[in-house]
Image: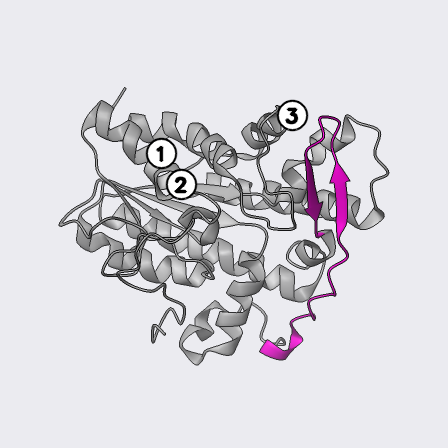
Amino acid sequence: PDPIALVRATPLLRRFDNAGPNDLLGFRNLAVPNSADVIFIGDSQTYGNNAPYELTVPNLIGSALAQAADSRVYSMATGGWGALQYLYIADKALAFKPRVLVVCFYTGNDPMESFALAYGDERWTEFRPNAGLSAGDVPPIPADAHWGVVFEDGTRTIFTPSRRYLSVHDHPVADAGWQIMKQVATQISSLGKAHDVQVVFTIIPTKELVYARRLDSGDYEIPARYQQHVAAELRRIEDFGKHLQTLDGAQYVPVLEPLQRAALGDDPLYPADSDGHPLPHGYAAVANALLPTLSGLSGAE
């Protein structure tokens, strides 16, 4: 285990199903470069669970930028990370002399994981916005109330809205988690500005929110908890997005609308089970939403 980040992937992992290859540092790349133009930071949504190496967001962007601007993309995303790990690794990423840092927050568990680390490790006490809380205040993860849906074209998936609701509902722990994310984003923005690095933020939504528009357009009996989750997540994204747009030296690129639009198509964006990580078509929607901004910053336009 990493002594600071606590969670680190296995270094020198060979390609294994839809994991790996991991480089010497444990990140999902073929090798560790001497320098990189664009660096991605995030959790398993950015690492690319459920997709082969070539079809993850960093590699889709990397392929496009390599052809257009001879830019090199390096991924420093790790499953199980939250906002505090993003801040920790953003500082280390400066060693690669990047021009752009892309930080991908995930609404599905970043707030709770960020809270757990801030309140469970004395090294992160400065990120505790509410002194009256403790690590033991984290609400228990509910027994998953699965809701399975068969869409009109025969494709299907399973949602877990009760589990995802924990990170976005009106609760002091969730509030603190989102406040930690705001503080981290502010510090990463300042770090980028101090080192002449452009910071690009995005917010990866949950599977439940991505499919909400498609469900609204059909004849489905949508559970109350699902509706509560979607409304709460939308409020959180709107509030966090407004904060990101105020940060000097940073840009915010929304990806929710492109994902919801892609979910209306014929290609499934997520697996048929309860896994909340996208399939390659889902990652492609995120990459396509980010590419215009990153192309401009990399001189590919």
Mark 1–mark 2 CB contact (< 8 Å): yes
In this rendering, would 215 be left or right of 294? right
Query: Is residue 144 in the magenta section?
Result: yes
Q: CA distance from mark 3 to mark 2?
A: 21 Å
Residue 298 is situated, as x and y percent measured from the top left of the image, at 25, 30
Question: Which quarter of the figure is the N terminus placed in?
Answer: bottom left
Amino acid type, label 3: Leu
Residue 164 is situated, as x and y percent measured from the top left of the image, at 66, 54
In this rendering, would 126 be left or right of 23? right
Provide the secondary structure element on which disc 1 rests: helix
Q: Which residue is mark 3?
A: 264
* Residue 297 location, quadrant: top left
User: Which residues lie in the magenta part?
Assistant: 135-160
Identify the residue at horizontal 61%, vertical 40% (top origin).
238
Q: Which residue is mark 2?
A: 56
Residue 23 is situated, as x and y percent measured from the top left of the image, at 25, 56
